[in-house]
Structure formats: C-alpha cells, structure tokens
Image: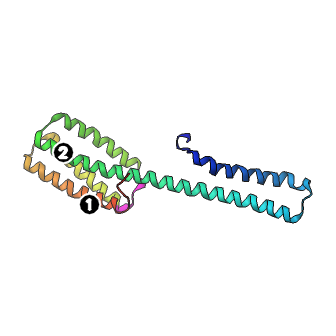
Amino acid sequence: MLKSYRKWHVLIDLVGVVSLGLILSYVFLSESMNLTEKVMDIWSGLATELMGAWVVARVVEFAIRRNSEFDKVRVRTARNLRYYSNISNRLIEFDHRPDLLLIQKEQKWSKSFYTQHENCFSQDEIDDLDNSYAALDRLITELVSRDKTNEELSELLEQYETIALKAEKNIFEETPEIL
C-alpha cells in the first residue's frame, strides 16, 4: 500500500483529514460555542463538501489506477502470445533443445498469469485467448515429440499465429499497446 502512495496523495488526504476534523468538531464542539445559525450552516456545509470532494477524488484515483493495472495485464498477455511465435519459429528452424525447456516453463507461467488475471478480459477476449492457448498447447506438444516434419510444424505454428493474432487484435482494440 505504501509503495503505491504518491506524494500528491498527501494533498488529497489532507483535504480528507481537514474535513474529518471539521465534522468531528461540528458534532462535538458546535453546541458549546454559541454560534449563529448562519455560521453553523457554513461550518456543516463546508465539512460535508470537503468530505464529499475527498471521497470522490479517492474513488476516481482508485478507478484510474485499477484501469491502468488492467491495461498492463492485457498488454503483457498479448505480448506473451508474440513471444511464443518467435521462440517456436526458432525451435523449428534450429531445433535448439534448451529453447524447448524454456518455452514449456514460460507456457506454464503464462497460463497461470492469465488464469489469475482473467477478470481483466471481456468474454470474447477470453474465448480468443483460450483458443490461442489451446493451439499453443498443440504446437508445444508437437515440438516436444518432434514426430512431425518441419513443414508440418510450420503449419501448426502458422495456425497458432493466426489464432494468436486474432486474440491480440481483440485485446488491442480497447487497450493501447504503449505501456
């Protein structure tokens, strides 16, 4: 929590503290001060207005921060789809076995990351991503077994790339890639 607390939050929270002080002083001290009704109205109005402004500012700031976090997850997921295309191509061309271990490890991480953040995506994006990961599973299974020729593996890679590109385009319709 403190990690995401910025210097400008102090200004916002200062308004909240001042309004809370005004509210508490109005509730507990106003009767004993014998002030006019006009001053009491201004006091209570100022206290509630400041509290309302503070609440709205914090809610808006939270919504903006939350949306930014969603955008980062969405972009990272789309970029992961590109990564698999690149490393799979390298595996087909050069049959570099350490890349095979790497792609399997990354696939597990990527799928768990996607599963944990599935709420960041709309249903059509989830469907596209599920299709992409299913095609990726088929491709990696064939890369591991190495029972197919390079041409057949390239066709599987092309199928994956087509499905992954559809998912990527769907994600980037609503999310800018610049993050």
- Residue 68 is situated, as x and y percent measured from the top left of the image, at 45, 53
Q: Does dot 1 land on a helix, a strand or a loop?
A: helix
Q: Mark 2: which amino acid?
A: Ser
Pick whichever of labels 2 and 1 is earlier in the sequence.
2
Q: Is residue 125 left or right of residue 161?
A: right
- Dividing the picture into quadrants, the one containing residue 71 is bottom left
Outermost residue on the top side: it is 98
Residue visible at 30% across and 41% down? Answer: 108
SS for callout 2:
helix
Quadrant housing residue 162: bottom left
Residue 142 visible in the displayed image: no
Q: Is residue 120 magenta?
A: yes
Q: Specify whether 11 is left or right of 21.
A: left
Residue drawn where x is 58% and y is 48% of the image: 8
Q: Which residue is mark 2?
A: 88
* Quadrant including the N terminus: top right
Q: Is residue 113 visible?
A: yes
Q: Residue at x 18, y 56 (%)?
A: 159
Q: CA distance from mark 2 to mark 1?
A: 18 Å
Residue indicated by mark 1: 166
Depth check, front residue: 75 or 41: 41
Q: Mostly what secondary structure, the magenta segment?
A: helix
In front here: 48 or 35? Answer: 35
Q: How is the image coloured?
A: rainbow
Magenta segment: 118-124
**How many numbered markers are drawn?**
2
- Hey, what amino acid is under mark 1? Lys
